[in-house]
Image (cartoon, rainbow, N blue to C red):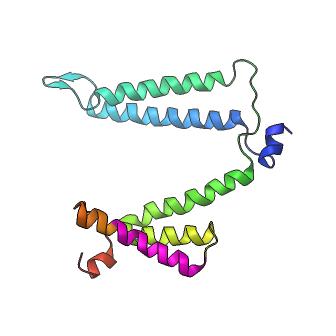
Amino acid sequence: MSEAAHESGGAGPSHRSVEAGVAVAAGVLGLITVLGSLRVGIGWGDEGPMAGFFPFYIGLIIIIASVVNFANLFIGDKDHGVFASWDQLGKVVSVVIPTAIYVAVLPYIGIYVASALLIAAFMRWFGKYRWTMAAAVGVLVPVMAFVMFERWFLVPLPKGPLERMLGF
């Protein structure tokens, strides 16, 4: 087991496997961009470049960079130690999943209610604050954001049924 694995607390995915996964994911995104650009046209029209002109070349650059990054994984003798321990990755996932749920429910319950729930849950879960403190901060921060964005800056943010019920 490498020294990095001891420092990070155990075994986990290697740098090589993570870098390979990122290269493949970026290459797939580049490919999707290229294919989407081809659908809307990549040529030059009467009024200038068509809608897919710039995205096509950006997607092409992303694909080439991904292939180069993937190929570099197998060139030379590099240290391919542990990227992160499974425990560390578990902590990252424990933040990513609630955040993804926050983004998913935001259009249905509004940004203020979703933010209040996320803040309170994170304070309770990660910060180990008492429920009263987590609930108070969870309510106050979205209220302050509402006043700042909706009233002072006149920037409407996504609202849900609660805001509509309150007349906003």
Foreground residue among 137 and 29: 137
Locate residue 144: give its quadrant: bottom left
Magenta span: chief secondary structure: helix
Locate the C terminus and report the quarter of the image it occupies.
Answer: bottom left
Residue at horizontal 70 percent and vertical 35 percent from the top:
15
Image coords of residue 48 (percent x, y): 17, 24
Lateral position of residue 82 relative to residue 166, left or right: right
Q: How many discs mark residues in the rendered view?
A: 0
Q: Is residue 79 magenta?
A: no
Q: Is residue 68 visible?
A: yes
Image coords of residue 163 (percent x, y): 30, 76
Lateral position of residue 84 relative to residue 93, left or right: right
Give above or below for 130 relative to 112: below
Residue at horizontal 86 percent and vertical 39 percent from the top:
1
Q: What is the residue that sits farthest to the left in this orientation?
A: 46
Lateral position of residue 148 relative to residue 67, left or right: left
Image coords of residue 11 (percent x, y): 80, 46
Q: What is the residue that sits farthest to the right in this orientation?
A: 1
Residue at horizontal 69 percent and vertical 22 percent from the top:
74
Foreground residue among 105 and 60: 105
Locate residue 162: give its quadrant: bottom left
Image coords of residue 61 (percent x, y): 44, 24
Q: Is residue 137 magenta?
A: yes
Q: What is the residue that sits farthest to the top in this orientation?
A: 76
Give above or below for 53 relative to 125: above
Q: Is residue 109 visible?
A: no
Give above or below for 115 relative to 73: below
Residue at horizontal 62 percent and vertical 69 percent from the top:
125
Locate residue 131: give its quadrant: bottom right
Specify the segment rendered in magenta.
130-145
Lateral position of residue 30 relative to residue 124, left or right: left
